[in-house]
Image (cartoon, grey):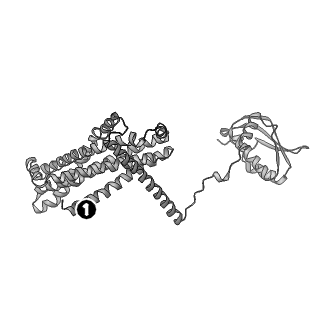
Amino acid sequence: MSINTTEKYRIINSEEGLLLQLSGNWRFQDGIPDIDRLLKQLLSTKPEELAFDCRQLGNWDSGLMTFLVRLINNCKENNIQTLQETLPIGVQKLLRLSFAVPERKVTRREILGQPVLAKIGNVTIEMHRNWNDLLAFVGELFYGFLNFLRGRVRFRYSDLFYQIECAGPSALMIITLISILVGIILAFVGAVQLRLFGAEIFVANLVGLGMAREMGAMMTAIIMAGRTGAAYAAQLGTMQVNEEIDAFKTMGISPIEFLVFPRLLALIITMPLLCIYADFMGIIGGAIVSATMLDISFFQYFQQIQGFVPPIHFIIGIVKAGVFGILIATAGCFRGLQCGRSASAVGFATTSAVVTSIVLIIVADAIITILCQLLGV
């Protein structure tokens, strides 16, 4: 249904000047007249003053305010004075409030592409700031570790046990699922190729060595980076937003000792244990494929692993898991303490913690693998 809005205002030329008579309801649901037609009439006459007659004005809402604000702004641009004394009291108050603080054009966000050199400079400055913050964080962490060895570190052991529970038993379900699937995938891929040579029994060697030396620690670390490392960053980031970190510093309590150390020790303790569990679950997954697809009994499968995979490979995987735990806790806590003071900053810190943890895990794994090759382990 179309609404007729042409009769809601009328321009009257009087002896006092130009008079704009408003009538009817001025609400968005009733339709607001097009102001362009009125502006053309004003520009054609160019009066010195514009007054209002609101005796026949009915109900109104923000639709009237939008109309009047645009009209008054155009009158100011064309040196036409508007007499607002005859407007309703509520309209006059809203107009005064609207024009009390003029809009600053510099507050408008302009989306402009930065030059390439400016982008490179910003990235370099950010990297330098992150590097300085990381060195300071590692230094405080090392100093706190010395205090821990001397028995002078300040944190609650109840927090440590709670963090161990969150990082350890609570993660068993997802570790079980992922590890079994990884073992099944390794066994299936190996079976497809080894079956061509009639060497299906060596699937046990592939799964056992792969899980013990690489995949057990690697998959556990990636899962914990996305699960626990992100949680650390979100928790400490939220505390940073709520100024709880500042409160600890004000009370003379080191956030590194009170907040970071329980989380760091929890991952150092739980990561090797989770790695051992992941190795076992991955080997079980390979055994399922061997028993169902290759007609290799569980006894033959485990006997082959026992004869081919010595304990040193499991020890290397466990050491990797411990190193990965240190890196995950460090990255998560560092990004959390580095967080800004907004909700979006917490989200960015969480994302950055996961990305940083995974990158550090891959780099550390490559370094440890190269060192093992050089040492002949």
Residue 187: x and y in percent read 18, 54
Judge by depth and name the residue closer to the eye, 5 or 313: 313
Count of all numbered marks drawn on residues in the image: 1
The amino acid pointed to by label 1 is Ile
Q: In the visual, does 189 lie left or right of 251?
A: left
Decide if residue 178 is in sight here.
Answer: yes
Q: In the visual, does 97 lie left or right of 334?
A: right
Residue 374: x and y in percent read 22, 63
Q: Residue furthest front?
A: 150
Decide if residue 295 is in sight here.
Answer: no
Residue 112: x and y in percent read 57, 60
Q: In the visual, does 310 lie left or right of 70?
A: left
Mark 1, secondary structure of its residue: helix
Residue 365: x and y in percent read 28, 57
Residue at 18% from the left image edge and 51% from the top image edge: 314
In the picture of the structure, the residue carrying the numbered disc 1 is 370
- Quadrant placement of the C terminus: bottom left
Residue at 26% from the left image edge and 58% from the top image edge: 368
Q: Where is residue 231, by image quadrant?
A: top left
